[in-house]
């Protein structure tokens, strides 16, 4: 058997990995924004609630949370959760807690002078956040969001343990059937890498767009290109 | 008359018309152990132009920041148009102001900052129009038209779709002035608005402010080290030192014939550089 014979199986696995990654990212994003914003308001009760969320879900292992949702929740509530859904929930809740800290930090990093200008223009707290603070914090959040998305994607490999046929699951099965351990796992590694690159591509696009909006991006060339060009220039001098 | 324990007697007792536009009544402001304002009393009438001078740390900027509700008083009351900035009436008692009350009172107040503080996520146009549209509730068209008029006035009409980062400091400050005026304030606070500018850009900004002083009846409170400008536009100059008013008077007297030793020293230091 060659890799190309196995490709459809891998693509099927990649589909599940992608599905769980995107679902988990969507959930994590909503949680991160909500909890992050709530965590940066002045009201101490709301702030404390956000802090509790972050500490609880940052402190539990996504794998154990997923097992709990899949195995324990039905016993406790009588309600059975689809394995894919349990995976999305576990990863989203967990990564959302990290994301919330990222959002809170980015909001805090917006200069106080910007907040003061919104007060001088008599904006409401909601208008301040929506029109001035968040749009500026956004550019700062994106790089970390990119990292978290990739972490979540790699973390999704744990779903193979509750029999979701994702990339890792497929790789293990093919290893058993074909006996070609090296091929099975090498192929899986490559597929994960490709998915990560696709995710990063979109995050970098969003980063460039956010920087342009704040008027601080060099129009086209990427940051990496700029740095290399600068290094070459410096080296030649 | 309703009183709360930390309010001086007679604070709200004036009949309408007698009340000055702004009144500081035994205002105390501390930052930690550092007392910045010590029971400060002063008033500003509607339409008056007042310049605050004095060494750094004397409390001038704090006065503007208290008026803009960027800081809270530790004692005393600031009255604007007969309303307390820091307190509101509830069941006949004065209680600490909530956000809604503060928004109502500061509707009349605009501020221009030393570092311009334009919003980098918005074009010049949106910097000027967003707040009027969302907080005053005027239409986009009206806000746009007003922005164009104001940019004409500050000489930057052609920059309306530019991004703040594409402007020089002086241009940014002129946009910031237009942004503050778009809110149609009754009181304009100017906090060292030329201090962050390269020397050759200062004149353009001061010319715009002279023009505003000439053509409007907006009450202006400015903290500045530009003594020539202070002389031109102000009706009254207040000399501060260590949280107190050392001397006050018309600009001709303060700059031409200061009575207090501290004022003489300060002016000498500033003018001789």
Image: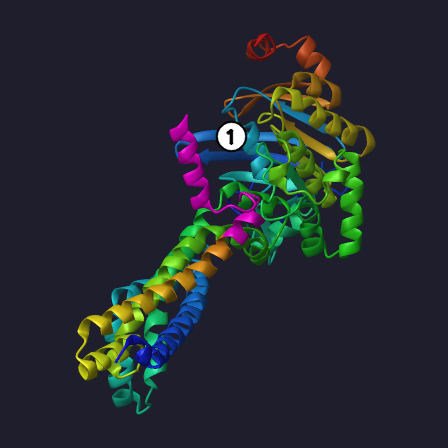
Residue B119, by quadrant, is top right
Q: Is residue B141 above or below residue A159?
A: above
Which residue is depicted at the point 56% across and 30% down? B61
- Residue matched to label 1: B37
Q: Please give the chain letter of the residue carrying mark 1.
A: B
- Residue B72 appears in the rendering: no
Q: Which residues are magenta?
A: A208-237
At numbered mark 1, what does the secondary structure look like: helix, strand or loop? strand
Which class describes the residues within 10 Å of circle 1: few (<14), some (14-19), or many (20+)? many
Question: Residue B144: where, in percent of width, then height?
Answer: 77, 50
Question: Residue A7: where, in percent of width, then height?
Answer: 34, 78
A236 in magenta: yes
- Residue with the most extreme front position: A2
Helix, strand or loop: magenta stretch: helix
- Residue A117 appears in the rendering: yes
Residue B197, by quadrant, is top right
Quadrant containing the C terminus of chain B in the rendered view: top right
Which residue is depicted at the point 19% across and 76% down? A180
Count of numbered tags: 1
B86 in magenta: no
Which residue is depicted at the point 60% across and 23% down? B198
Question: Residue B196: where, in percent of width, then height?
Answer: 57, 27
């Amino acid at each position: 058997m060659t890799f190309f014979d196995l490709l459809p199986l891998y693509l099927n696995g990649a589909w599940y990995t992608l599905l769980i990654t995107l679902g988990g990212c969507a959930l994590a994003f909503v949680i991160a924004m909500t909890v992050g914003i709530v965590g940066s308001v002045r009201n101490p009760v709301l702030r404390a609630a956000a802090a509790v969320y972050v500490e609880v879900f940052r402190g539990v292992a996504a794998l154990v949370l997923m097992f709990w949702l899949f195995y324990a929740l039905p016993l406790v509530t009588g309600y059975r959760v689809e394995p894919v859904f349990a995976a999305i929930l576990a990863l989203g809740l967990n990564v959302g807690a990290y994301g919330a800290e990222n959002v809170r930090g980015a909001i805090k990093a917006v200069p106080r002078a910007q907040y003061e200008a919104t007060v001088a223009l008599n904006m409401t707290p909601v208008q301040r956040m929506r029109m001035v603070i968040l749009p500026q914090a956004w550019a700062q959040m994106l790089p970390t969001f990119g990292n978290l998305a990739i972490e979540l994607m790699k973390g999704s490999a744990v779903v193979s343990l509750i029999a979701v046929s994702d990339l890792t699951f497929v790789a293990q099965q093919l290893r058993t059937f074909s006996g070609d351990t090296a091929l099975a796992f090498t192929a899986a590694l490559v597929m994960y890498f490709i998915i990560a690159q696709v995710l990063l591509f979109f995050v970098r696009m969003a980063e460039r767009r956010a920087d342009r909006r704040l008027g601080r991006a060099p129009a086209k060339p990427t940051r990496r290109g700029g740095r290399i060009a600068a290094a070459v220039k410096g080296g030649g001098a | 008359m309703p009183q709360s324990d930390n309010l001086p007697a007679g604070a709200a007792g004036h009949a309408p018309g007698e009340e000055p536009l702004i009144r500081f009544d035994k205002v105390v402001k501390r930052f930690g152990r550092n007392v910045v304002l010590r029971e400060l009393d002063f008033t500003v009438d509607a339409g008056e132009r007042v310049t605050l001078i004095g060494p750094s740390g004397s409390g001038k900027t704090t006065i503007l920041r208290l008026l803009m509700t960027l800081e809270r008083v530790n004692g005393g009351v600031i009255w604007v148009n007969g309303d307390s900035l820091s307190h509101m009436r509830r069941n006949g008692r004065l209680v600490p102001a909530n956000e809604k009350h503060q928004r109502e009172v500061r509707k009349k107040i605009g501020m221009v900052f030393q570092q311009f503080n334009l919003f980098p996520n918005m074009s010049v146009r949106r910097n000027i129009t967003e707040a009027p549209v969302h907080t005053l509730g005027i239409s986009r068209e009206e806000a746009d038209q007003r922005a164009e008029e104001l940019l004409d006035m500050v000489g930057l009409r052609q920059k309306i779709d530019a991004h703040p980062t594409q402007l020089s400091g002086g241009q940014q400050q002129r946009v910031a002035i237009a942004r503050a005026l778009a809110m149609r304030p009754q009181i304009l606070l100017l906090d060292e608005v030329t201090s962050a500018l390269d020397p050759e850009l200062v004149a353009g900004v001061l010319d715009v402010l002279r023009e505003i002083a000439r053509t409007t009846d907006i009450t202006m409170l400015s903290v500045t080290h530009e003594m020539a400008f202070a002389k031109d536009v102000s009706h009254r100059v207040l000399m501060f030192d260590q949280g107190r008013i050392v001397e006050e008077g018309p600009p001709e007297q303060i700059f031409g014939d200061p009575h207090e030793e501290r004022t003489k020293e300060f002016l000498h230091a500033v003018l001789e550089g």
